[in-house]
Image (spheres, helix red, strand yellow):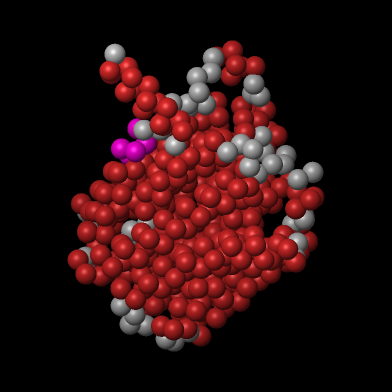
């Protein structure tokens, strides 16, 4: 009797606190993946990887996301069992961090970093589950998820960077494993997905029909493509080779981690700045186009930066413009999609922007190997200029997107 009462109370608590619990899990999820990336390119250089190899390793994180996010979104929409997918994502995050502790082999590092990308692919299900918890206010849910994502990465970047600077890279990888392990335990406390019958699944929107509707959605297509460009620029610069550029100038590991943390603090400020100020005076298309242009100009300015303070300023503004673009491309692309096919829409969005996460570091690393990092940043900036022109021509205003 007492056991049944405890079980009932636990189930009540899980249902009542599911929102907060999932946000804590989401925080630990990103902390498990981001204790070390701010110093990953200097680490790869230290163990003897070429710039091309570094680019491939960084791109592997995006490649696995690119190929898995849409299938996982479709699969989870079909099964309607998103808790299982959340547990799987946290498990891969733990395995990735543990694997990086155990090897210095370049290609094994590629595999374990790609495994981190597998984990990140399950962000689709975490996002979709939280948006389903808050089905009446999906825009608010997107804001919560963006806030948690940014805050977790800031904390992990700063703490992990300081740990690595003082105790070495294995301790930074180990800290990521600790965060992932705690998150995995908490995943087990999430309430079970609402049971549905096979008849209910078959009576609902067919999976392939849902995919077809998603692929015909103008907001989803353009939001996803321009988000891919944003990720291309980000993984070429702030999240890719800018830390290596700073290291080449003699900036210490501790100061690089602070620099990357500042980039993430700017991400939090961007969410408030756009939602509370800029959207009152400008249309969303104007904000997104201007932020893409500023992103491009900042990349052009990196080769001119010769000291830590200048790099700090560049990283700060890169954080503002990049987060502005990713948050509102995601909102334009997915917030209007019905909940029964939202994971499919999110999977498509995140799969497409994963292309930028792969191409950015791969192209930048190859160009840097042939020429220099400075010239690689300039090439990335020209990609941004092309995107600005396309946005002026093709990106519809928010009202048009939602038609």
> Which span of residues is magenta-colored?
184-188
Residue 105, quarter of the rendered image:
bottom left
Rendered residue at 58%/57% (across/down): 326
Pick the residue in front: 240 or 193.
193
Residue 79 falls left or right of residue 51: right
Q: Is residue 307 above or below residue 101?
A: below
For the point 68% across and 69% down, the residue is 290
Picture residue at 42% right of the left edge, 58% below the top: 153
Q: Position of residue 80 (x, y in %)?
A: 52, 26
Q: Position of residue 241 (x, y in %)?
A: 43, 69
Is 366 left, or right, of 351 in this rendering?
left
Decide which of 216, 89 is in the foreground and name it: 89
Between residue 357 and residue 281, name the one nearer to us: 281
Q: Tell me if I can see residue 272 in this picture.
A: yes
> Which SS does the magenta portion mostly show?
helix
Which residue is depicted at the point 75% across and 49% down?
A: 401
Residue 40 drawn at (x, y percent): 34, 63
Quadrant assignment, res 325:
bottom right
Residue 394 located left or right of residue 382: right
Residue 72 belongs to the span the image colors magenta: no
Asked if one can make out residue 221 in the rendered structure from this viewpoint, the answer is no
| Residue 209: image location, x then y, percent | 67, 28
Front residue of this view, candidates 363 and 349: 349
């Amino acid at each position: 009797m007492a056991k049944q009462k405890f079980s009932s109370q636990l189930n009540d608590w899980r249902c009542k606190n599911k929102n907060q619990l999932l946000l804590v899990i989401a925080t630990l999820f990103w902390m498990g993946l981001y204790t070390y990336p701010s110093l990953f390119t200097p680490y790869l250089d230290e163990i003897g990887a070429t710039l091309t190899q570094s680019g491939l390793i960084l791109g592997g994180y995006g490649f696995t996301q690119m190929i898995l996010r849409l299938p996982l979104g479709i699969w989870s929409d079909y099964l309607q069992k998103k808790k299982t997918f959340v547990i799987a994502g946290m498990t891969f995050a733990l395995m990735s961090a543990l694997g990086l502790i155990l090897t210095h082999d370049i290609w094994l590092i590629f595999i374990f970093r790609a495994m981190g990308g597998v984990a990140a692919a399950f962000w689709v299900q975490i996002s979709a589950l939280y948006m389903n918890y808050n089905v009446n206010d999906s825009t608010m849910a997107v804001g919560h998820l963006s806030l948690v994502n940014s805050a977790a990465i800031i904390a992990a970047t700063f703490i992990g960077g300081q740990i690595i600077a003082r105790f070495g890279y294995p301790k930074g990888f180990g800290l990521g494993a600790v965060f992932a392990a705690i998150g995995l335990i908490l995943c087990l406390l999430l309430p079970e997905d609402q049971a549905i019958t096979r008849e209910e699944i078959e009576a609902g929107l067919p999976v392939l029909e849902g995919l077809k509707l998603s692929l015909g959605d103008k907001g989803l297509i353009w939001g996803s493509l321009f988000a891919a460009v944003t990720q291309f620029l980000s993984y070429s610069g702030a999240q890719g080779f800018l830390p290596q550029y700073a290291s080449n100038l003699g900036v210490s590991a501790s100061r690089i981690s602070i620099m990357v943390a500042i980039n993430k603090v700017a991400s939090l400020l961007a969410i408030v700045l756009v939602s509370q100020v800029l959207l009152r005076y400008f249309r969303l298309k104007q904000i997104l186009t201007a932020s893409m242009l500023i992103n491009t100009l900042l990349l052009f300015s990196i080769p001119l930066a010769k000291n830590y303070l200048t790099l700090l300023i560049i990283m700060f503004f890169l954080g503002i413009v990049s987060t502005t673009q990713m948050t509102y491309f995601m909102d334009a692309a997915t917030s209007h999609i019905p909940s029964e096919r939202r994971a499919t829409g999110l999977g498509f969005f995140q799969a497409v922007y994963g292309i930028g996460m792969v191409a950015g570091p791969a192209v930048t690393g190859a160009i840097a190997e042939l020429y220099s990092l400075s010239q690689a940043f300039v090439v990335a900036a020209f990609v941004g200029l092309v995107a600005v022109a396309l946005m002026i021509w093709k990106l519809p205003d928010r009202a048009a997107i939602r038609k």
